[in-house]
Amino acid sequence: MTFLHADLIAFAVALLASLGLTIPVRRLALHYGMVDQPGPRKVHLKPIPLLGGIAIYLAFALAILVTVHGVPQQQIAGILSGATLLAVVGFLDDGKLLHHQVKLFVGMPVAALMLIATGIHAQLFSNFVPGMAGRVLDGCFTVLWVVGITASFSILDHMDGLCAGIAAVAAAFFTISASMNGQTLVRSLGAAALGASLGFLRWNFNPAKIFMGDGGAMFLGFLMATLGLKVRPDGAPFPITWLIPVLILGVPIFDTTLVSISRARRGLLPFTSPGKDHTAHRLSNLGLGHRGAVLMLYFFAIIFGGAALIIPYYSVATAYGLAGLLILGSLFAIYLLEAAPYERQAKVPKTFLPSDS
């Protein structure tokens, strides 16, 4: 089959599998009482089944196993192994069977090391630091990138349709970028992730009938981090290549930055004080409502993704100028959103470490 044909099949298989599997997974979650209860940190008002991430995971894995051929199988094994590890860790965390520190300090770093072991890593410092030192720095950055992006999607899953929708937009732009540059593996992975996210989004958009849980959010975050490491614009100079994944993942990076700065400024540990102070919460409180806030973040994700596609065609100076403007704009947006109404959470003892937020 042609590469384009394979990508369309990967998307269709993942989409249909995710659409269909979500229904029995929802029944399974209800049968075993795996539901997310309402609470002061939640926006839903009645118990919602968890475990939707199982449908996303199975749909993605099925699409990849059916369509991905003629590419480095070692890398496919590394990606699926890391993704499976994080999905399992997340599902155990959803079921309160695992201490939440394990996912951040064990699960995510080990998944990153699985990628490195199969040759998937950042190529950042090795561009200007020769020898082993550059490779070691790239390895450290790879772990930091995978942990950071995976965690950002984990905490992004706080409003109906937000995490799945942002993952779908990011996967679409990774797929387009890879198609423009002949990266067949990234195209197939992106197409499968897009289909799996959109299929689940049918049941997860407001009002949600099921949540993906931390297993699904960590799984999608790991996939997005991996696609960010793999995407390589053809012929683009080094200073520009690192901007592509940062822009495509601009919304989760922005949201994590906002809550980190906001909570640190209030004397809170950023990842230990979950609350309704995320970007979507603040936009909702400004009058957009839940759906409006989520759709607004979809819009910004599309804007960032569009910028990622055109930035390779500009000079290095222009690219960095655009990046500078986006950074300044983001900082200004953080300043404005800090003035927006949100529910302030109390300090928690520093002995506690990251939990769902």
Image: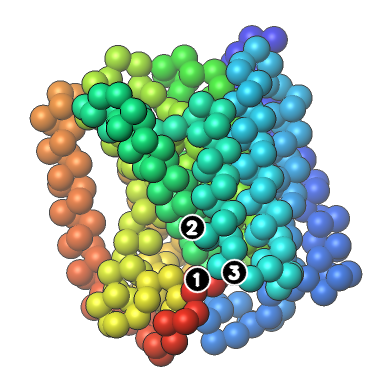
Q: Is residue 200 above or below residue 11?
A: below
Q: Point out the tag, 1 or 3, that comes first from the N-terminus.
A: 3
Q: CA distance from mark 1 to mark 3?
A: 7 Å
Give, as a three-letter code, the residue at label 3: His
State the SS at label 1. loop
Pick the residue in front: 78 or 357.
Answer: 78
Q: Is residue 242 above or below residue 237?
A: below
Residue 62: x, y in percent?
Answer: 76, 34
Residue 192 visible to the viewer: no
Residue 204: x, y in percent?
Answer: 64, 59
Residue under numbered circle 1: 354
Give, as a three-letter code, the residue at label 1: Pro
**Pointer 1 local density, CA inside 10 Å: few below 14, some 14–19, many at least 20:** many
Residue shown at the point (23%, 29%) measured from the top left: 129
Residue shown at the point (52%, 60%) measured from the top left: 105
Residue under numbered circle 3: 100
State the SS at label 3. loop
In the rendered image, which quarter is residue 29 located in?
bottom right
Residue shown at the point (15%, 27%) measured from the top left: 316
Pick the residue in front: 295 or 279.
Answer: 279
Residue 233 visible to the viewer: yes
Q: CA distance from mark 1 to mark 2?
A: 10 Å
Q: Point out the tag, 2 or 3, that comes first from the N-terminus.
A: 3
**Pointer 3 local density, CA inside 10 Å: few below 14, some 14–19, many at least 20:** some
Q: Is residue 347 above or below residue 221?
A: below
Q: CA distance from mark 2 to mark 3?
A: 12 Å
Tell me if label 1 and label 2 are in contact, CB under 8 Å: yes
In the rendered image, which quarter is residue 330 located in?
bottom left
Residue under numbered circle 2: 151
Residue shown at the point (41%, 37%) measured from the top left: 139
**Residue farthest front in this picture:** 132
